[in-house]
Image (cartoon, rainbow, N blue to C red):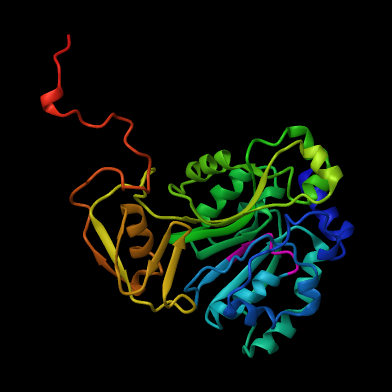
Amino acid sequence: MNIENSRDYYGTVLEGSQDLKTDACCTAEAPPPAIMAAMRNVHDDVRARYYGCGLVAPQAIEGAHILDLGSGSGQDAYILAQLVGQHGSVTGVDTTPQQLAVANEHIEWHREKFGYATSNVMFVEGDIERLDALDLPQGHFDIIVSNCVINLVADKAAVFSAAHRLLKTGGELYFSDVYADRRVPADLLDDPVLHGECLSGALYWGDFDRLAKEAGFADPRLVTSRPLAIGDARIAEKLDGIAFHSATYRLFKLDGLEPECEDYGQAVRYKGTVAGQERVFELDAHHLIEAGRVFPVCGNSWKMLAEGRFADHFEFFGDFSKHYGVFPGCGTASPFAAPVNSAEAAGCC
């Protein structure tokens, strides 16, 4: 039912973002100046059929090759096409013919608007649950993005697994979606409005964490999140108290990431050279790295910065030669009781 309902809801039921019944498929974040400027260069017809829930434009992507899963009418693809530049590329995949028609109709218009000799954007019709059927190059993409779409598909594990195969080592899946604070009852998936509004297919956050790790993304990082308002009383009644959040995660494809944040005495110093984040680099919601200061990091964060496209923007200190346990305040605390003072220790049998 999922794919058929998605095609009908986004191709026929909704004529524009004004027809949405909740704010689940809306972006509440204020775009930074570079994204706002790029958005102004997107055709009005494309913008009118935008249904994303977050900003899927990670830092330092000039020259990158990006895959957009569930690209819809193409707004994110056309924004990213400006940020990657003429030497980068954006490939959008979507299953709704009406949305693809809007995206494809304006390819030449955007090429001229951007001033490119050839378009760096293409759109492919396909089901993101079956990416292997599309003959996309394995290990090719620097970044995969998705904006409020993975919740719409039934086999979410297939999406995460295929994304891991399609990414280069050091690449990342950077995506926004809707999550629930508990597992949504299966019978709600049959409700076309709840499904189309990105609610009944939302993953319980604990299940997401497990599926991401099973696909090979060992350390999911939360970038932003916000609670969703369910303004329609009839929809709220059906959901019976389930709370939903829109959240953006980044998942890195890196060898050797550990399930916990382990401390090896490492640190980084940010050079302040990423455009738009010259003062503070935001790796995720818990790692805001101020330029010029030595910033202690766990081994996983060190790898995320050192073994991908961010490496030139940092100085790196330390290695993995000595382990100091779980990184304080960043991982699971030790399950054991605090050491006992030897003077107070008593014998036991």
Along the line of sight, which residue is nearer the eye, 324 or 349? Answer: 349
Q: Is 343 left or right of 273, judged from the image as shown?
A: left
Q: Is 248 left or right of 318, judged from the image as shown?
A: right
Image x and y of residue 42, in percent = 71, 79
Q: Which residue is found at the position 80% from the left and 43% from the top? A: 236
Q: Is 211 left or right of 38, judged from the image as shown?
A: left
Q: Which residue is found at the position 56% from the left and 78% from the top? A: 83
Along the line of sight, which residue is nearer the eye, 289 or 87? Answer: 289
Image x and y of residue 348, in percent = 17, 12
Which quadrant is the C terminus positioned in?
A: top left
Q: Is residue 140 above or below residue 35?
A: above
Q: Looking at the image, which residue sits at the far top?
A: 349
State yes or no: residue 330 in magenta: no
State yes or no: residue 71 in magenta: yes
Q: In the rendered image, which quarter is residue 278 located in?
A: bottom left
Query: How many callouts does the rendering have?
Result: 0
Along the line of sight, which residue is nearer the eye, 228 or 249? Answer: 228
Q: In the rendered image, which quarter is residue 286 located in?
A: bottom left
Q: Looking at the image, which residue sits at the far left?
A: 343
Q: In the rendered image, which quarter is residue 183 located in?
A: top right
Is residue 9 among the parts visible in the rendering? yes
Is residue 138 among the parts visible in the rendering? no
The residue segment tinted magenta is: 67-73
Q: Which residue is found at the position 63% from the left and 68% from the top? A: 91
Image x and y of residue 4, in percent = 81, 48
Q: Is residue 203 above or below residue 278?
A: above
Which quadrant is the N terminus positioned in?
A: top right
Along the line of sight, which residue is nearer the eye, 164 or 274? Answer: 274
